[in-house]
Image: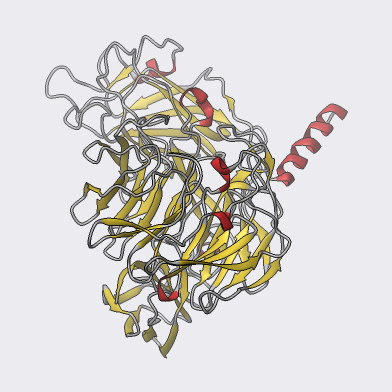
Amino acid sequence: MSFRSSLSAIYIAVLILAGSVDSASVTISRSGWTATSDSFQAGNEPSKALDGNATSFWHSKYDPAPADTLPNWIIVDMKASYNINAVSLQPRPSDNANGRIGGHRIEISTDNSSWKVVAVGTYNNDATTKKTSFVAKPARYVRITATSEAQSAVNQWTTIAEINIFQDTAYAPPAAGKGLWEKTVDFPLVPAAVSLLPNGKVLMWSAFAKDNFGGSRGFTQTGIYDPATGESSQLQVSNTQHDMFCPGISLGFDGRVIVSGGSDAAKTSIYDPSSDAWTPGSDMRIARGYQSTATCSDGRIFNIGGSWSGNRGGKNGEIYSATANTWALVQNALVSPMLTADTAGVYRSDNHAWLFGWKNQTVFQAGPSIAMNWYDTVGSGSTTGAGNRLDDGDAMCGNAVMFDATAGKILTAGGAANYENSDGRTSAYVVTIGAPKTNPTVAKTQSMAYPRGFANGVALPDGTVFVAGGQSRLHPFNDDTAQLTPELWDPTTGRWTQLNPMQIPRTYHSVAILMPDATVFVGGGGLCGSCGANNHFDAEIFVPPYLLNADGTRRARPVISTVATTARLGANLSITTTAAVTKFSLVRFGTATHTVNTDQRRIALTMSGSGTSYTVAIPGDPGVALPGYWLLFAIDANGTPSVGKTIKLAV
């Protein structure tokens, strides 16, 4: 190796250790490649997708009738093995939309026999080249399967003008015991906001446009991702007259998704998963955007801050009654004590509060200001100072996760002094709340390895906390200094573990939530129109270490055989499993946007029983076990969780 090559290798290694290097992605020469397909029209053979001519294309058979029907596949043989990390598909010329691929699956193989799925999803119906990126894996063959056409659910054609494949020139195999990024999921929009639904699907939305925001347009691009198929539906929601970009999001006790404010700053929209329908709620008393909301112990939804939209300043508390569909001011729930000292002023300083609904209709605000506060939501309410987070400083766009609700424990991590053009922090703290309106206990825990703002934190079934994405220096709509190496915090040791890096930067406008199968959905970022590569129409699915054997294969998992689908607070819940387990936990459904996920929290359940029959005690306080939809997990002696069962907790 030359001296210059040695320096390059050292430089790449240093960047990887810094957690912020984007793996190289270089187009592979297609010389000598061949392609085969399940179907083609004479004159539109699969080789046309490799000929370098964008006016020629592979087309599935359509004449003579009957035409071949979807799904259609094409296999590219690269004639050698590469560490590939992206595939791009150029649609046929834009004068004809027939055959544009919507639903799709991308698989790779080293032998044209055993195939691994690296990407699934749904592409937009437009003529732009679609590039799907994923964590690099060795392959000689790439198979692209079209499962639906983008422009019509009725049409049965498939076309591709050009296929290009990219390799990672800095490839390193994933480290054992550090989890795996399983696949990428492509969406027809940038998922800047998401919510888990009782059927296991994910509701997502962007803004008035699939890739941009701005103004008050009165409609929103939404979609629903189905993990069972990998595909997403699309819907423009206009009946609520609400551009739902940058809102507050909370889940009601009945599972409805309550979305308030944002670009249309006074509006409220409600998604009901039981009817798969959006309906308008009443307007807020104070127009807001970038605020936070939290579901309270009585089912009402508290709302505070949000000077990004509407008039600036004075964004004191108000509360929503889902049963009456009314907002009411909480006069003495004051925003001023929770302001940060952001250099941009109140426009930024009241954004994205870290809120936790708690006992007796109180809400605890853990940050991002260094000052913490209690809000009483009864009547005209009150504000009670709760001290500072020790030496943390303001931590705008950091994370706060209630990983042990029974004990009132919250992990805070990262953030920055200012919303933008500010360095991210590594610091982390455990805040333990108890009786409302009393000062919590705050303890410093090990700092993260990488400074982060705009990251997302997720409570996992075993009590660990997963933090992914973000930037070391906060710069909205730019992926510079993106942190690609996620970290996992263990409450038993108070230490962080670095995990295998993701492929795609997740910075401003990214999201992350826990999925029912105990994997993590990490997606989005961008939503900035012409910013190009900084718009991320996708998510990556992370498989935590607790689901993997040492060789990277999936562990055998315990299975919950029987359990009721509803349970009362304070009641005992009977559970049967297929094998012995040692723990049970509940994790409340998550919602996420702009680093905020006030819905998720985890409860470690007290259990009795043995063998395959168990009983767990549901906490009786609705401030701890907030009614609504939760995922129930059984965990075996190896720390491996089951697939979560959806349980509705009721008062």
Task: Give 169 or 344, whichever is nearer the viewer.
Answer: 344
x, y (%) of residue 4?
84, 27
- Which of the image's four quarters has the C terminus? bottom left
- Classify residue 496 as left or right of residue 264: right
Count of all numbered marks drawn on residues in the image: 0
Task: Give 490 or 414, whichever is nearer the viewer.
Answer: 414
x, y (%) of residue 573?
32, 83
- For the question of whether residue 186 can be seen, the reply is yes
Q: How is the image coloured?
A: secondary structure
Residue at 27% across / 21% down in the picture?
40
x, y (%) of residue 592?
44, 51
Q: Is residue 240 above or below residue 528?
A: below
Q: Is residue 8 above or below residue 375?
A: above
Residue at 52% across / 48% down in the picture?
351
Residue located farthest toward the right when viewing the structure as drawn: 3
Residue located farthest toward the bottom when viewing the structure as drawn: 609
Q: Quadrant of residue 558?
A: bottom left
- For the question of whether residue 506 can be seen, the reply is no
- Classify residue 92 as left or right of residue 359: left
x, y (%) of residue 625?
40, 74
Task: Give 238 or 338, whichever is nearer the viewer.
Answer: 338
